[in-house]
Image (cartoon, rainbow, N blue to C red):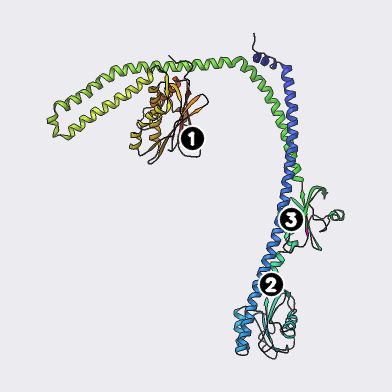
Amino acid sequence: MEPRAARLLRVLATPAAAAAVSLALGATLLGVGWMEYTTARRDLLALARTHAASLKAVVAAAARSNQAAAAQTRDALTARLLDNARLLVALDAIEPLTEARLAPIVERHRLFRVTVLSPRGERELFVSGPGTGPGQGAGRGAPPGAGIGPGTNQLIDRLIAQRESEAVTDLHAGRRGGLARLAVGARRANGGAVLIAVDATDVLQLERQASLDSLLGDVIASTPDVAYVVLDHGETRSVQGAALPESLLAEGTGTSDLSVSEHRHDVDGRPVLELGGPVPFADNTPARLRIGMRLDGLDEIARQTFFRSLLSLAAAIAVGALALGLVWLQRDYGALAAAHARAREALQRRDRLAAMGELSATVAHEIRNPLNAIAMSAQRLRSEYRDALAADEDAVALLDVIRGESQRLDQKIRQFLDYARPPKPVLREVALPAWLGAAVDTQRAGAEAHDVTLVLAPVPSIVAMMDPDQMQQALDNLVRNAIDAAPAHGHVRVVASLEGSDVVIAVEDDGAGIPDEVKPRIFDLYFTTKREGTGVGLAVAHQVVSSHGGRIDVSDRDQAPGTMMLIRWPRSGPASVPA
């Protein structure tokens, strides 16, 4: 009987079914596109509201900041002037003030004018600072009105008539206009007064920076998406930006209603979303801000999103038709390709093992026997000529080199033979904690020689099917590679766990890691990046783990330098042991 999945694929591969599936897919994607359009528009509107709320907070914060800065500057200037007035009153109590004594003080403290009044309010003396125009250094007997400006009369009244000890005027314009003035006065010991005026133009300019019209104008100039701003603050209204018709201005409720509102209308033929709400000011007077956000860009982005959805729809229909064609091809050729890949892999493996078998036989016959003879001869020379060699250290060293290198070559040959003719694994149940502890202990001497700390994490109580000798050979290769890769004072960590039905042993190091371009080849026979490596160790390890029905995975460590190799095999052993 034909399998159900195959019958379904055969039905879907017909033209009528393909057309029906394409239409259904098109309708689905059209609905998805419309949802994407409406979602994008809703998100953009939310972004516009957030932008307006941020602007409202910026306007309020900037106004409060500028008002506070102007007040602090004015207070600091007033305090300095009062200190100067107190100083002059104290000096006057010691000795009557003169122009000669006042002039250096006026110049040093950059005062605009100092006026000394008699107990009856008559001017006894006044001295002006440099660059103040006519009247500078007028001295005693100045003409009436000299040194008197708007705001000075109130000081005279408060100090002379009301007998206050100190008084301060508000910021005011100069007598002849132009510069701003700030004046203070202190009562003299004899009942008169000392008045000090200073140029407060900088303070006035700072307050003008706090002007709401200037601030809102800057917002309009720097933010193209804002069409207009209307601020009702107390009894005043500031309007910046696009010219609004009276009907639209009348929609604002001033400061009588401080609730949050949202309206949509057209300004100059362009859509605008108006957002309004209360704004807190430092003086606690009621204020309401209305911000008109242009929607041209928002609508354009939404339209582009919709058009992109239509393009995606057309592409998806084309891809759907192509996918149906690929399904048909997969149905007819997929199984054949998979079988071909498996056969090719098996053939390559068989050819490789056959070549290794032939090579190992040749090596065993042509190299091992002469190599053994060389090693035995070196040992015999050292034994029979021990007395003669006792006085010749160089000869003893040469014999040791011959013997040592012979043993090293014999070990390399054994590695070739182990890979070419791997023994069949003898599986049995093994308690993982004891086996892994013993296997790691065999590598501790090598780790200490490389100044590397070898750590075995607590092993859970696991019993697994495996050939302990072969699996230890694979683990030894991985641990040795990790020790070689770790830096001086580095660490190698071995961790065992159970994931589902698989036993997993992780070997981690904190070395430089394995380059991405090298990872696909590390298990290839004879491939190595070490100067004295043979490229056999990892290949043997991979072969051993594969014979247990498992695999070795290689990856970078999470959020740490180095490499992590994972040995993974079924806890109950492979389904069948390879021959």
**Magenta range:** 281-287
Q: Residue furthest left?
A: 387
The kind of residue tagged 1 is Asp
Numbered disc in front, either 2 or 1: 1
In the picture, measured across the screen, residue 237 lies left or right of residue 76, that is right
On residue 220, the disc is 3
The secondary structure type at the circle numbered 1 is strand
On residue 201, the disc is 2
Q: Is residue 512 above or below residue 20?
A: below
Count of numbered badges drawn on the protein: 3
- Residue 224 visible: no
Foreground residue among 493 and 273: 493
- Where residue 116 sits in the image (x, y, percent)? 68, 86
- Where residue 216 sits in the image (x, y, percent)? 74, 58
In the picture, measured across the screen, residue 512 lies left or right of residue 413, that is right
Question: Badge 1 is on which residue?
Answer: 556
